[in-house]
Amino acid sequence: MEQQYGICRVAVAALRAEPSDKAEIASQLLFGDQVEILEQTDKWLFIRNAYDGYEGWVDFKQLGSLSAEQYAARHYYDTLVPAQPLNVITAADGGKYYLSPGSVLPAYENGCCYLGKDKFNVSFLPQGPDAQASTERITATALFFQNVPYQWGGRTLFGIDCSGFVQTVFKLNGIKLKRDAWQQAEQGSTVDFLPEVQPGDVAFFDNTEGRIIHVGILLNANEIIHASGKVKIDAMDSEGIYSAELGRYTHKLRIIKRFI
């Protein structure tokens, strides 16, 4: 069939591992996320997220349609919802959408964004494409998410997983990372020794089989902010993450990467 494209038209949509409401939520689409449609059933669409290439099944009712020209012109994610608590857009019928930081405002212009012909008034100042990443900005953005609860596959203020947290923080600072921790570990440049880290460096952790299973953002050589139970700050050393709450190490350090 001819290639089809879509755009997320709800604040957050579950991206599932299988075409079923009971299936695992592997990730989420946020408002304005653009996708390629790879397969479809009566209710479900198998899609690829334009931003990071992540694939999964989404309920067709949660996507609007895009032409190939619109998809090509608007998938650069220039105008984002910023890291602040209340981001509201209003549809023509008065309905409000409460958007999470990192959501996209498609075709933004003069205080409005557009999904096809649908116009939305934006009640906040969006984050434009001129955002410059710095160690200070990375850590400030990370700290904004502190105490957000952990949720497998989550990408919002109501629940976020470890790699979704890291991806969103860097997205809000103009740096594109992949979705899963093991994919992110293949990006960036290696920091060889813990004393050489700078704020905003990213630490990855593995299991006994050597598989990357966790990721977090270093605030300094001794502290890390990561999503585990909730987004929180824990002690860090060359062995890994030490949880004072549990009185033991919880994650074994594998590698540190730098993206700025």
Image (spheres, rainbow, N blue to C red):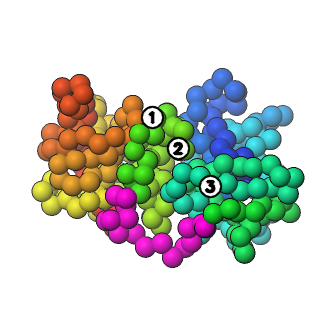
Tell me the quarter of the image containing the C terminus.
Answer: bottom left
Residue 171 left/right relative to 93: left
Query: Is mark 2 in CB contact (under 8 Å) with mark 1?
Result: no
Q: Position of residue 51 (x, y in %)?
A: 57, 58
Q: Position of residue 156 (x, y in %)?
A: 54, 44
Name the residue at 65% across, 30% down.
18
**Residue 186, quarter of picture:** bottom left
**Residue 82, quarter of picture:** bottom right
141 part of magenta stretch: no
Q: Secondary structure at mark 1?
A: loop
State which tag comes first along the sequence, 3 or 1. 3
> Of discs 3 and 1, which sits in the foreground?
3
Magenta span: predominant SS is: loop
* Residue type (three-letter) at the residue carrying disc 3: Asn
Between the residue at mark 2 and the residue at mark 3, the CA separation in whole angstroms equals: 11 Å
Q: Which mark is residue 216?
A: none
Magenta part of the chain: 125-140
Q: Position of residue 84 (x, y in %)?
A: 52, 56
* Residue type (three-letter) at the residue carrying disc 1: Tyr
Residue that carries the numbered disc 1 in the rendered image: 150
Residue that carries the numbered disc 3 in the rendered image: 87
State which tag comes first along the sequence, 2 or 3. 3
The crowding category of the residue bearing disc 2, from other C-alpha atoms within 10 Å (few below 14, some 14 to 19, many at least 20), is: some
Visible residue check, residue 258: yes
Residue that carries the numbered disc 2 in the rendered image: 157
* Residue type (three-letter) at the residue carrying disc 2: Leu
Between the residue at mark 2 and the residue at mark 1, the CA separation in whole angstroms equals: 10 Å
Visible residue check, residue 51: no
State which tag comes first along the sequence, 2 or 1. 1
